[in-house]
Image (cartoon, coloured by chain):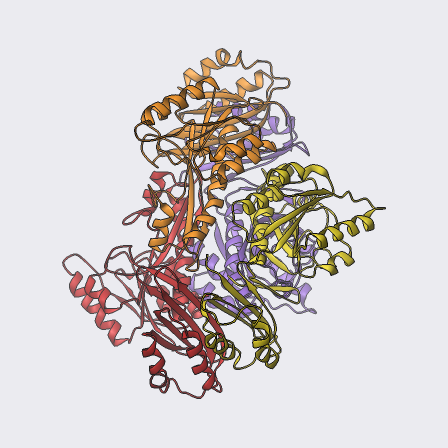
Chain colours: A orange, B red, C purple, D yellow
Amino acid sequence: MPDTATLLINCPDARGIVAAVSEFLYKNDANIVHNDQHLDAERGLFFTRIEWELSGFKLSLEEFPPAFRGIAERFEMQWRVERSTSRPRIAIFVSKYDHCLADLLYRWNCGELRGDVAVVIGNHPDGEKLARFYGVPFHCIPVAVATKEAAEASQLALLVREKIDLVVLARYMQILSPRFVAAYPQRIINVHHSFLPAFIGAKPYHQAFERGVKLIGATSHYVTTELDEGPIIEQTTERISHRDQLADLLQKGRELEKEVLTRALRWHVESRILVYGKKTVIFD
Amino acid sequence: MPDTATLLINCPDARGIVAAVSEFLYKNDANIVHNDQHLDAERGLFFTRIEWELSGFKLSLEEFPPAFRGIAERFEMQWRVERSTSRPRIAIFVSKYDHCLADLLYRWNCGELRGDVAVVIGNHPDGEKLARFYGVPFHCIPVAVATKEAAEASQLALLVREKIDLVVLARYMQILSPRFVAAYPQRIINVHHSFLPAFIGAKPYHQAFERGVKLIGATSHYVTTELDEGPIIEQTTERISHRDQLADLLQKGRELEKEVLTRALRWHVESRILVYGKKTVIFD
Amino acid sequence: MPDTATLLINCPDARGIVAAVSEFLYKNDANIVHNDQHLDAERGLFFTRIEWELSGFKLSLEEFPPAFRGIAERFEMQWRVERSTSRPRIAIFVSKYDHCLADLLYRWNCGELRGDVAVVIGNHPDGEKLARFYGVPFHCIPVAVATKEAAEASQLALLVREKIDLVVLARYMQILSPRFVAAYPQRIINVHHSFLPAFIGAKPYHQAFERGVKLIGATSHYVTTELDEGPIIEQTTERISHRDQLADLLQKGRELEKEVLTRALRWHVESRILVYGKKTVIFD
Amino acid sequence: MPDTATLLINCPDARGIVAAVSEFLYKNDANIVHNDQHLDAERGLFFTRIEWELSGFKLSLEEFPPAFRGIAERFEMQWRVERSTSRPRIAIFVSKYDHCLADLLYRWNCGELRGDVAVVIGNHPDGEKLARFYGVPFHCIPVAVATKEAAEASQLALLVREKIDLVVLARYMQILSPRFVAAYPQRIINVHHSFLPAFIGAKPYHQAFERGVKLIGATSHYVTTELDEGPIIEQTTERISHRDQLADLLQKGRELEKEVLTRALRWHVESRILVYGKKTVIFD
């Protein structure tokens, strides 16, 4: 995989953005390998993702921001540039269900996920064996009503110490406080075991079973302070029938959860996601 | 297609049901072609669907009920028997959107649907041309707030006159009164343009677009007096992306609506659906 | 829908293509609404599709080619520019099965397809009633082994007379001669009722049934002189089970055929398809 | 999960089969929990799967065969009865790719698969670490052209010693000899990384990439002496686009392989599969 840089831009729509950006890159000898753009015509918003090879590019990534500042200010851009060789440091939070943890660790270990799983944090000890097998430090930080604030303080201290860029809630069955969420804006990915906005809250498979739906689903999303209301990254569904009892829904659901969480994590670390309002743009 | 009878049974679970029914059919020289059974272990309910060839069967369908009564009473069965050559009389209700109407009429005309489309009823005149092309009488019965009761009375009179067995709401944008619903229990099929229970009520595609979901859906269900709460027959979903604007959702949704409504209608007329509580068993 | 122009480019990869094109458009006051790019790194090929609003654009589409020529020659581009308000003239070929025909005519009539269905040509008279209902001229040109050459000559004369841009084979059960194919390169779309390259040739559903596959499929592709070997535009599959008999495969397959053929036609008329070798790029 | 018995029957269709079997079970106080039946009308074959609770059943599973013999002979049945608490002994064969191995071991360990993974056999040492983590003995038996016969002899000896009931080829990149296949008829499950019968043989993802298909697939099947021609158990497909390079196909394909192999294994150990000719009946 070549060494590339990816520029993500979100700004009000205007004439000349594409020309200005591509002219800038061309002058600095960029060889563009991907270039995708989206326009939300209703809201007048422009989004783009451009990836170019760093071999031969005239600017270092330290020189990029000052050089690009003029264009960014002219078009009122929110922007960031990421290097494909950078490896975000990831913390996985887990409770007792370990299917998402096992899946993520396997994928990370075999090189499917750009990034480093730096730590696994459980409020139960169940994930330790798997974490150890893959050589990842495991910390058990129990959470009870009375100790929640202290537990979150410990978690946050650990995240800072480990220089974590991204928190993945892999069926972590605790609700994070607004303070925690505010510390990692658009940096916490959760998997909810339903097709949101259906079956918000607790025990969605039980709710689905009671309602008699013919499909179940799962959703990965960024965590915000409103429960299950964050920007959706990915969703999928699977057919069920009257033959499927609750245990079957749980089993089929595990596949969906792994699928949407893996994709969300992969797209995040590959800088493919732009959030605006409650929505996401996913560049493919 | 051979001339067959289908027996649908719904009763409390007990030993000996299968033996009693199959012994009864065997003694009367039935050649069973399909036999499917479902047990809701949690609620202790037994469901079955048995289909056999009428060629060689000793009983006429008039003789069947008295002959079967002993078994039915012994096991407290709710049951019915249907003949594959019977053709339920169908009324299609429509407003302005005619994609479901066009789809159902085409399928019916080419023989895909067992049954006779006896009448199309619109609260707008838009469906008339299509109905005529397929040789089906069209009645325009406008519905306004002040005239709703009278309009429903006209509709019901028409359904009685046409000996309608099944009402299909093919994107009919009016809510039926409890009185209307009570006249055709488990005989009115509606299509809702969302993945229920997400986006109940008006303008579900708009709601979906605002929420930023990654899949849209459609649901067919029997109509009950609670809006969008009837037993679900079929659901499906389709992937969307940030590129899809509201018009794209509407277009993709039309495909889903046709799909779930066709399946519901087909399964109903083929006697494949058993309703219990808010749920359905679909025998395949 | 705004009046836009779409530029499709296919050329050897090189630095500066994006900058040159976007600079050119910017100088002529284009407001870009879509911009997508693909790089086949292995073969060193660059593909792009750019769409911009014509309101305010300085060049007329007649002035565009000479103005753009310099850039096109510098990068050895194959390119074309299409206007969103242009309406390709479409001929639909059909035999006896009319489900694709009915589906396409309905969609075209309700405005889902950009373009004009100018003529329906059948080798049997079956499609005439539907064509008439939608106000499209129907021509029956029978094809037998002895008359094939003459029949094709009549068809081609009709296509020329009607100024046809695109030929759609909607389950047309005849193989076109190389001469016919050569007259409309990348302008003839066929639907094959299998998941190519599985079950090439005649009676693919029968082949699928015999083999005992668990999914059936359909494929839309451009027609080349090699049977079922043209560049694939779209494919889809549907689950089947041991319960599905041959008639069920045929019925389920009809849905797939309509789906892939509609998409292929829509993408073609919206200038979303670039062909290279045996492959297609589909810009979404 | 209750202790149940499952009876699988495959015989020529005849009147009275259902009555005879259900009468037999009723007389012996069986409480039937599942009962499914399939008729291949074309070939005149009858298939059924009946599951009943053993609590209260009068016969032990040793007493069952002599008691059932009369019915079985009368209808020329091929039949077998399995106990839900029996745990088939499974051998997993693996080469270098370990995604299917990791997936199966995780599922087995968490109780998703009825059965005991008794041994993992690799022709390379790569799978050892995973096998050890899950506490399963690993044997490395290298295979080269000159040593193939001896290697298979070692494998077969190991299978006999371990009393293996089922062999799972989890991306095992060797072709088994007819002698090996004959030793485990309908007891060897393979995963092929394409949608059979498309792309038979080596490097199917490369073939798919070259052909420009829009979907890739995977197939699980019983192994017979004809390569990739055994009875298909399960298939699935996944959408790809021109953006997907070969590495993406490989990655997406791994998900499909895990999915179809897991399902095949689960259905086999739950006695849900009946093979006839080149086809399978999958009772759900």
Task: State the residue lying farthest toward the left.
Answer: B146
Q: Position of residue C231 (x, y in %)?
A: 63, 48
Decide if residue C27 is on the left or right side of residue D206. Answer: left
Decide if residue B46 is on the left or right side of residue B31. Answer: left
Within the image, what quadrant is residue C93 found in?
bottom right
Which of the pair B197/C37 is nearer the observer? Answer: B197
Q: How many marks?
A: 0
Determine whether C271 is above or below D232 in the image: above
Determine whether C161 is above or below B28 in the image: above
Residue at 39 percent across and 70 percent down: it is B269
Q: Is residue C244 visible?
A: no
Q: Position of residue C66 (x, y in %)?
A: 58, 30
Residue at 71 percent across and 38 percent down: it is D125
Q: Position of residue C211 (x, y in %)?
A: 64, 63
Which of the pair A231/C157 is nearer the observer? Answer: A231
Decide if residue B85 is on the left or right side of residue A146. Answer: right
Determine whether D66 is above or below A201 in the image: below
Within the image, what quadrant is residue B15 found in?
bottom left
Q: Is residue C276 visible?
A: yes
Task: State the residue lying farthest toward the right.
Answer: D146
Residue at 22 percent across and 61 percent down: it is B142
Which of the pair A158/C137 is nearer the observer? Answer: A158
